[in-house]
Amino acid sequence: MDVDAFRAVHEQDWARLRELVRSRRLSGREADELVRLYQRTATHLSALRSAQSEPVLLDELSTLLVRARSRLTGARYTTWSRLGRFAGRSLPAALWRVRWWSLAAAAYTVVLATAAGVWVAGDARVQAAVFGSNEDVRRLVEEDFAGYYSEYANASFAGRVWTNNAWVAATCVALGITGVFVLLALTQNALNVGLQGGLLVDNGRGELFFGLIAPHGILELTAVFVAAGAGTKLFWTWVSPGPRTRSQALAVEGRAMVGVALGLAVVLFVSGLIEGFVTPSALPTAARVGIGVLAEAAFLLYVLLLGRPAAAAGETGDVDERDAGDVAPVRG
């Protein structure tokens, strides 16, 4: 194909299309002309691609067609409006929908952690079996537990904590469909907190334990419970998909739960900042715990005030229908 000759023949159409795209208002006749020129230029681009034409001309026409398509269809949602809808409706609705699963995860963790703490407290043989020699126990109680929060620079520690916790939360959601991973993760977390807590309380360091755990741990554990609840809901969707096919049900809930994982990354970022800068700070214990309580209250109010009405209005946390794709109708 002679590209120069092709351009010479059709340049007038392309110039007119550019003019219509830039026009602020179009009459009915001009709108029809825009449609015709858009279709014609799309055909030109297809022919040039088949002939492996010069990349510059291909990019030029591709850009022109994108602008013309946007003018024809309009921008239903801007990036900011999509983000606003996600933060104001989709995410809180999805969080609200997994509340009972999250509460179940919290109850399991509290019961198991308490049992582990009671088991290890007051029994030197159990403490030796779990933590090692008396010297190891002494070092953990008097040095290592508190030293963990000041081992690294504040910003570095906050970043390490955030990335680790966000990964754990995302994994809980992604692998929740197995029905096993969430239980294992909750069990490991509960035993870790319960055993260390029981050891410190038994050695008269209970105030230190709760004073260092509570500021960031309240919000952090809430995020873990929500992630576990989201993963468990995926598993239950696979077990009992309802009137939809199993693949359709998993697609809908999977997209919603991915949104939960993204939202929890923000929640855990806040928790990481608290753990990196507030927990090891010289603030009084009451002030540090108060900051953690305020962060937790803000999250719960966000879910309650935005999530409950959005869910009641039919919001599920899934993406828009045009982004989700078509599905076959089902009965019931």
Image (cartoon, rainbow, N blue to C red):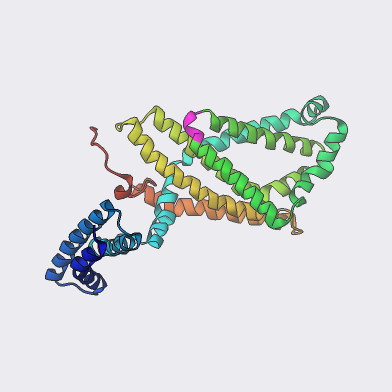
Q: Quadrant of the N terminus?
A: bottom left
Residue at 74% over, 57% down: 281
Answer with left or right where residue 238 lies relative to residue 178: left
Work out which residue is located at the far right of the displayed protein and give it.
135
- For residue 251, above or below residue 59: above
Depicted 154 relative to depicted 244: above or below = below
Judge whether 250 appears above or below 35 on screen.
above
Q: Nearer the viewer, residue 168 or 206?
A: 168
Residue at 77% across, 59% down? 282
Please name the predominant secondary structure of the magenta segment in the image: helix
Give the left or right position of residue 201, taking residue 10 as reference: right
Q: Position of residue 63 (x, y in %)?
A: 32, 63
Q: Which residues are magenta?
A: 175-179
Q: Is residue 199 above or below residue 261?
A: above
The percent coordinates of residue 245 (x first, y second) are: 31, 31
Question: Hey, which quadrant is residue 325 in on the image?
Answer: top left
